[in-house]
Every structure is written in structure tokens, then in C-alpha cells.
Amino acid sequence: MARAHRHKDRRAGRRGREKPRRPLRTALLVGLSLAVLTGAGAGWAYLRLGGNIDTFGADGLSDHRPSSAALGQNVLVIGSDSRSGENSSLGGGEGEVGRSDTAFLLHVYADGKHAVAVSIPRDTLVEIPACKLPDGSWTEPRRQAMFNAAFSVGETPEGNPACTQNTVEKLTGLRVDHTVVVDFQGFAALTEAVGGVRICLPADIHQGDLDPNRATPGKRVFRKGVQEVQGQAALDYVRLRHGVGDGSDIGRIKRQQAFVGALVKKVREDGLTPTRLLPLADAATRSLTVDPGLGSADRLISFAMSLKNVELDDTRFVTVPWRYEGARVAVVQPEADALWAALRADRPLDEPETGGGKGKDKDKGEEDAEEEEVDGAGIAVAVANGTTVTGLAARAAEALSAHGFTVTGTSTAAEQGGTATVVHHGPADRAAAATTARLFPGAKLAASPDPGVRVTVGQEYADAPSPGPSPKPSKAPGEDARSAADDICSDLSYG
């Protein structure tokens, strides 16, 4: 009892001393997430971590989300470049509105031994779907908008994580299981807690490289070559754009991915022991704002256990396939679709499409899964048009038949105007429904007491390009991937 009271007093005192926590831009988002999650998986951290965690409301998530039937788990880690509150001392711009600058979608494979972090550049042109505003109303969808604008919807200091999650799900067709927001102040403490992280620079970096508006180069900030950074210096490094390579945000992402790998490597080299990990986990969770699904120590620890067996060689980093479109970034197809398809199938990025995913047990006689060529043999499906677009049910029926499904009939749905495609299924037909949903990106599964599988196609299917011969990607999704074990001096920029 006395020990419990002492712990309670210490925790109360710590809360009284805490500075306000606000989300702020960081490109190290997935590294911090990986580090805290790998370090939080032990009972000794339970009470301490539980006192640190903040959550955001999930009432702004879309009603039309991708199916949750996919293998593995997906964690979206995002941040804001607002310099409001205590974080203003870290430098950078001004303003009270939380603005997303960089984001990673972390896919943890079902085998618990592999993970891929996909960077989404801030200037990527995407569709931002309807998002909830602070007054409870919802925005209209926006096409060809910059990805970082989603986090600013509502113009609040804490940003809009739910809107960013909606945007990522729309872009990828992957259901996001958890979302994490990170701030700079906590990240600085994290890099200090691990005793610094090794970086590598191809040239000396001066003050003018950190601030391009400066009239003179100023003092040298970083020397050429390998060195360790922590705290403010670590923040300066991950924000650095100019003076290295082509000076682009895309080039900076390459260095950020290398830093993330070095951070994960440092944590593992130091040893996953309570003495070493408690300061790290404490610093990291102080910087996190998470969805309600991770909003307690036991939930965070449970998810952490799913990462403890991911080795350095199996922690990989890629950037969504891209090209410049003026001053913005456009997603390149069909390469991007091939990347999302591999993750939906829980398939390694360097494995051919005909291979089984990491979570599949071939000893049980399962056939190798093909994401692009869905096999509907033996599955009967009824199709209904849930829109006012003429011929949409027939179009869906043709696509189903081409993949071996048996279409039992087409009709017009009783209610029209739905956005997402919904695959209804009986109690024993969930697996068949999940296979059917793979032909309709973004489709939602819905249980029904009636047996069988029924597809109601929505406006999203009407807006999608008509099916035809699918062009083949020019390269495999994982061709440009790096791992946490790679040389920190290799492949650090473009140009």
C-alpha cells in the first residue's frame, strides 16, 4: 500500500510538472513509433506509460472504410508542423494551426516478423474525402488536394488525425487499424534517452542550409561524415533539406528513413532491458496522441508485443511511387496500386504476385494467393446498383464473371446514393465475401443473417476507371526499399 501511494504521488507530481503536449511536425514518426512500441512490451512499464498517453476522438472517421478482413496490421503515424505552445522553442515556422508535414503508413505482417513503412510525401496530390469539422458538420470531398492539407481541416492546434486517416484509407484501400500523432518536444527527449543516433552526411552543413533565408552560410552545424546527434541537433538533421542532394522534400525523406533505421538499430544494440527502455518508452509516450484503440497502457503493450520479433533486415522503408507534377507530387500508377495490393495481400514487396503472404500457412494446403487475379470459382454473388448510374450493376457483374464468380442476378438497390461499395454476407460466408471485396477497392463488409454474398456497388465504383487490361508496373514495389540494417551512408538523397 505504501509503495502504491508513493507511486501515485510521483505520478501526480510528474503530471503537475508536464508541459502542454501539442502535435508538431516530425519526419521520424515511424521510428519513434517503432522504438516506443518495441520498448513498451513489458509489465514494468504499465503504470508509468499509462499516465503519459493522450487520445483523440474517432468520431470523425469515415463510415465508408476499407474492409477489416486484410491480414496484418496497419498503423498510420503522422505529425504537424505547428510551432505553437512549448514546441515553439524548437524553431521553424509560427502559427497555431496543426499542419501535417510527413506521414508513414506502417504495415506489420501477420507473421509478426516483418514490417514495411511507406512514406507519403506532404505535397502528394490526393483526394481528401469528407471530413468532420469542430462544429460537427462535414466537408465536401476535395480532389487534387495536397496530402498535408487533410490534417489542417478544421484549423485547430491539435490538427485533424481522423481526416488524415480517412485520406490514407481512400488513397491506399487499406484499413488503418491505429493512428499515432507525434510532437517534436517528445522526439527530442527520445533521441536523448537513447544517447544519440548515428547519421551520415555527404558534405558539411552550415546554418544557411537550415535557414535558406539567411544571407551568409554562417557557422558549421554538421560536419561531413558519420556522427551522432540527439535533441535539437537530431531535429535539425531530420528537417534539413538544403545543402544535400537536390534540396527536395523527397530527398529529405530518404535521409529520414535512414535515420529511422539507425534509431531502431540503436535501440536493439543497447538491449531490450527495463533499465534501458523505461526512459525511452517514457519519453516516447509523452509525445504520442493516439486513437482510442491504443489509448491505454495495456492496449499499447499488446500492440508492442506484435513488433518485438521484427529484425533489422526485415524492417523496410519505401516511398509511395511518385513523380513531379509541377511543384507538387503525383502518385505513379500502376506501381502504387501494386504496392497497396501487396500490403493488402500481406505479401512481401520482393515476392512475386503469385506467392503466398507472410501470414499464410502453405502446410494446410492453401493455394498461393494472387492479389491482381482474384479467383472467384465456387462463389455465387448477387449484384445490386446502389447509385443512379445506369448499367453499373452489369459492369460489376461482368468483372465478377471474368474472375470466375457465378453471378446469380443483377438489380437496382432499394436505396441509392451510397458512396462505398458494400459486400453483404451470411454468417458462414465471410471468407467468400472477403474474396469478392478484393475486386472492389475500398469495399466494406457487412454481416447479414441471410446466407450468401450480395454486392451493392456505390458511387466510388462508378467513379473508378472501367475495367480493362491492367498495365504492369515497371518495377517491383520493393525495388527501392531500404532496411534498418543498411549502411547509413548509402542512398541518402536524389541528385
Image (cartoon, helix red, strand yellow):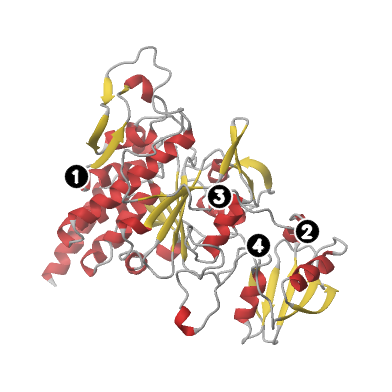
Q: Circle 2 sits in a helix, a strand or a loop, which is it?
A: helix
Mark toward the start of the polypeptide (3 vs 2)? 2
Residue where numbered disc 3 is placed: 475
What amino acid is labelled 3 in the image?
A: Lys
Q: CA distance from mark 2 to mark 1?
A: 54 Å
Q: Is residue 344 left or right of residue 464?
A: left
Q: Nearer the viewer, mark 3 or mark 2?
A: 3
Q: CA distance from mark 3 to mark 2?
A: 29 Å
Relative depth, front residue between 320 and 306: 320
Quadrant of the snapshot with the N terminus: bottom left
Q: CA distance from mark 3 to mark 4?
A: 22 Å
Q: Residue furthest top?
A: 215
Residue where numbered disc 4 is placed: 441
| Position of 289 relative to 421 (above/below) | above
Q: Which mark is residue 372?
A: none
Q: CA distance from mark 1 to mark 3?
A: 39 Å
